[in-house]
Image (tube, rainbow, N blue to C red):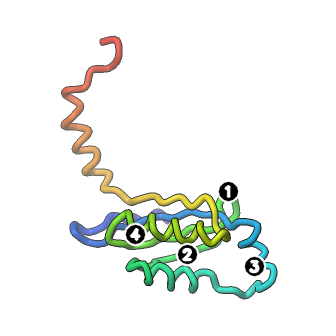
Amino acid sequence: MVKSFKSNKGGPMKFVVLGRYTEQGLGGFVKNPSDNRAEAAKKITEAAGAKLIEMMTLRGAYDFIAIVEGSNFETAAGMKMLMEATGTIKDMTIMESVDFNKAAEIASKAAASYRPVGK
């Protein structure tokens, strides 16, 4: 299912966060397999003034994905800074949802003044 993460005008911004656990982080899971990292992520997200909407573990290049609502990009960046500083998470990638239709409107307006190379 494809979900739209389009935020309301003036509403919270939505972010998709991907990350990987370090060897230290994976070692923590081995020591305590029942550790609820989604609950820990929820607490730290709320402490930063944001809201964890959903978190899942993944199979593939990344170990987890989270959907987060926050008031600005700096909130998400601050969370990344803290999480990676713990040494248990690496390669956190923050992707911000955008209004694709608005982006297309801007591209459409700008297209009249664009000249391709060599023309």
> Please, is residue 1 above or below residue 118 in the view?
below
Q: Which of marks 2 and 4 is nearer the N terminus?
A: 2
Q: Nearer the viewer, mark 2 or mark 3?
A: 3
Q: Disc 1 versus disc 3: distance between alpha carbons?
A: 20 Å
Which circle, 2 or 4, is nearer the viewer?
Answer: 4
Look at mark 1 in the image and give the residue it sits on.
Answer: 61
- The crowding category of the residue bearing disc 4, from other C-alpha atoms within 10 Å (few below 14, some 14 to 19, many at least 20), is some
Residue at 25% from the left image edge and 51% from the top image edge:
102
Mark 4 and mark 3: Cα distance apart in space? 26 Å
Residue 2 vertical position relative to residue 29 in the rendered view, above or below: above
Read off the residue under disc 3. 28
For label 4, the residue is: 75
Q: Mark 2 points at which residue?
A: 55
Which residue sits furthest top? Answer: 118
Name the element at disc 1: loop
Left or right of 30 on screen, residue 7: left
Q: In which quarter of the image is residue 75?
A: bottom left
Residue 111: percent from the left, percent from the top?
23, 31
Up the image or down, 99 lies above or below 24; here it is above
Q: Earlier in the sequence, mark 2 or mark 1?
A: 2
Pinpoint residue 51: horizontal percent, then vertical percent: 42, 79
Q: CB under 8 Å between callouts 4 and 1? A: no
Q: Which residue is drawn at 35% across and 17% down?
A: 117
Tell me the amino acid under the disc marked 4: Thr
- In the rendered structure, find residue 77 and report the number of the disc placed on it: none
The 10 Å Cα crowd at callout 2, few under 14, some 14 to 19, many 20 or more, is: some
Residue 92: percent from left, percent from top: 57, 61
From the image, state whether disc 4 or disc 1 is nearer to you.
4
The disc, 2 or 3, on the residue closer to the chain's N-terminal end is 3
